[in-house]
Amino acid sequence: MNILVLNGSPRKNGNTQIMVSEFKRGAEEAGHKVAEFPVAMMDIHPCIACESCFRNDGKCFRKDDMSKIYEALDESDLLVIASPVYWYSLTAQMKTAIDRFYAYLLKGYRIKSAVLLLNAHDSNESVFDTSVSNYRQIIGYTKWKDEGIITLPGMNYKGAAEKSPKLKDVYELGRNL
Ligand SMILES: Cc1cc2nc3c(=O)[nH]c(=O)nc-3n(C[C@H](O)[C@H](O)[C@H](O)COP(=O)(O)O)c2cc1C
């Protein structure tokens, strides 16, 4: 299957990237094709609700890096949302990219299932509540099947994810898809 991974961290080689790389390693070993996009390092502008996409077969009028993600979206079966927690939520950059999925509301998505990968400094799991709730509501609305949610709390320095006991779960999730 084709997997579209969005990484919402602006930090190069940070904890989210560590999670994404482990997930990708597992998924590729299982024979899946993974397309990864660092949305926080791409030129992606917010949706302005013009709804020209609704009149143009899902084509957004904007000419920015989201076009690369739309191309992958056309071919993808599973979406991975990978993000650090910023102020108890997904990063603004991730949210901006997700908002642009609005363009496909009428046309429909090829995506059938999703995965959520999160990490945060706080060691209390409740730090993930808003992001998990947001994800569940999105996939409830789109009718995508949840393939797994993995949260890494206590990520109090860059690279901490390497030492997380839950990192192997991220690999396994990809490997067992
Ligand atoms: C702007 C900003 C807001 C953050 N907000 C939170 C927060 O609300 N709760 C928390 O536990 N960590 C918070 N963090 C810490 C990050 O979630 C944590 O460092 C994470 O591991 C970073 O992932 P990365 O290395 O992939 O960028 C915040 C970090 C930044 C830069």
Image (cartoon, helix red, strand yellow):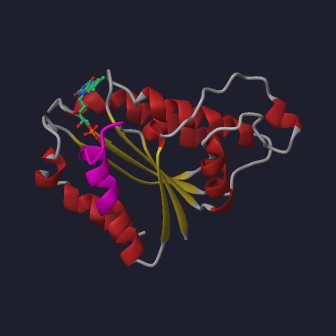
Q: Which residues are magenta?
A: 10-22
Residue 74 vertical placement versus 81 (above, below): below
Which part of the image, by quadrant, shows the C terminus? Answer: bottom left
Residue 57 position in % (x across, y down): 85, 45
Q: Nearer the viewer, residue 125 or 49?
A: 49
Left or right of 168? Residue 105 is: right
User: How many circles with numbers are drawn on the protein?
Assistant: 0
**Residue for point 45% across, 26% down:** 92
Place residue 51 in its image quadrant: top right
Residue 66 position in % (x across, y down): 62, 42
Left or right of 55? Residue 105 is: left
Residue 24 position in % (x across, y down): 37, 64
**Residue for point 73% across, 38% down:** 103
Confirm whether residue 157 shows in the render.
yes
View quadrant of ligand 1: top left
Residue 58 vertical placement versus 120 (above, below): below
Q: Nearer the viewer, residue 170 or 97?
A: 97
Q: Is residue 123 magenta?
A: no
Place residue 55 in its image quadrant: top right
The chief SS type of the magenta part is helix
